[in-house]
Amino acid sequence: MTGDIPPSADPNRLPEIGLAVAGRGGGLDDLRSLAARCRGCDLWERATQTVFGEGSSDARVMLVGEQPGDQEDLAGHPFVGPAGKVLDRALAEAGIDREQAFVTNVVKHFKWRPSGKRRLHERPNARQVRACRPWLDAELSVVRPAALVLLGATAAKSIVGPDVRVSDAAEPIESDLAPLVLATIHPSAVLRSVDSEAREATFRRLVGDLHLIADWMRSTGSADLDPATPPTPGSPP
Ligand code: URA
């Protein structure tokens, strides 16, 4: 499918080209190899590599974070660093099998600034988020998830609009991107908590929101869930 995209294709236009490829039936491997060459904004210059979404094109749940972090940039995989470990634990507690989910970010390159020997995360700006959006739209059009989970304010605001609040209890968001769209806190909020009590409360909030997804998937028969995990207490069977 990417065979008809010449290697000389303008790398600045690869996000739009990728979206068109997805529209013509291209798969995730096609998109991943195009995204690896992307120069749609300036972030590629300092990043090690593009970190494209991972998971099956049959995944029923898509989880979207902000951008790869330091470890993701080096490994080339989303959510494999400290925030990823928190996400893994929260998913497991909610009974969602990460192997059955599609995990990605709104921005596919790590944005950072140097601080001594460290690379400090910097939030992507609106132009960088906009430039990367066709890749997310391409992922959505291939995977067509039943549930779309937006992790943190950057993902939520850039995808559903500036009014969305992740500090409030998660409510389904009206959107044509997926049958169920929910915004919740970013797993890194757990790591930033001031003490162990706050950390536990923030983690519980994340697990609770993921449980809503699991319950909805179960009640609509969209499943791929861990059958050993009981539904949230009080939820319909
Ligand atoms: N934070 C994110 O938003 N995405 C990742 O992949 C890792 C950390």
Image (cartoon, rainbow, N blue to C red):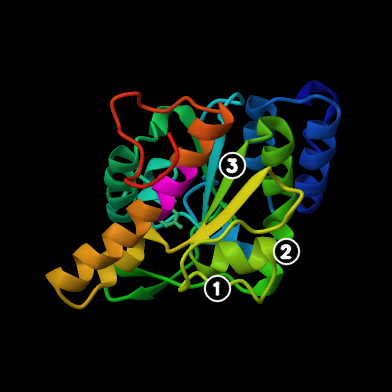
- Count every numbered label the image shows and give the total: 3
Ligand 1, by image quadrant, is bottom left
Q: Amino acid at mark 2?
A: Arg
Residue placed under numbered mark 3 in the picture = 147
Query: Image quadrant of residue 4?
Result: top right
Left or right placement of residue 13 versus residue 40 in this view: right
Q: Which residues are magenta?
A: 209-213
Residue placed under numbered mark 2 in the picture = 130
Cα separation, mark 3 vs mark 1, equals 18 Å
Cα separation, mark 2 vs mark 1, equals 20 Å
Task: Provide residue 140's location: percent of width, then percent of height.
Answer: 69, 40
Cα separation, mark 2 vs mark 3, equals 22 Å
Residue placed under numbered mark 1 in the picture = 165
Up-down: is 183 above or below 15? below
**N-term mark: 2 or 1:** 2
Q: Using the rendered image of the protein, determine whether residue 67 is visible from the camera's viewpoint.
A: yes
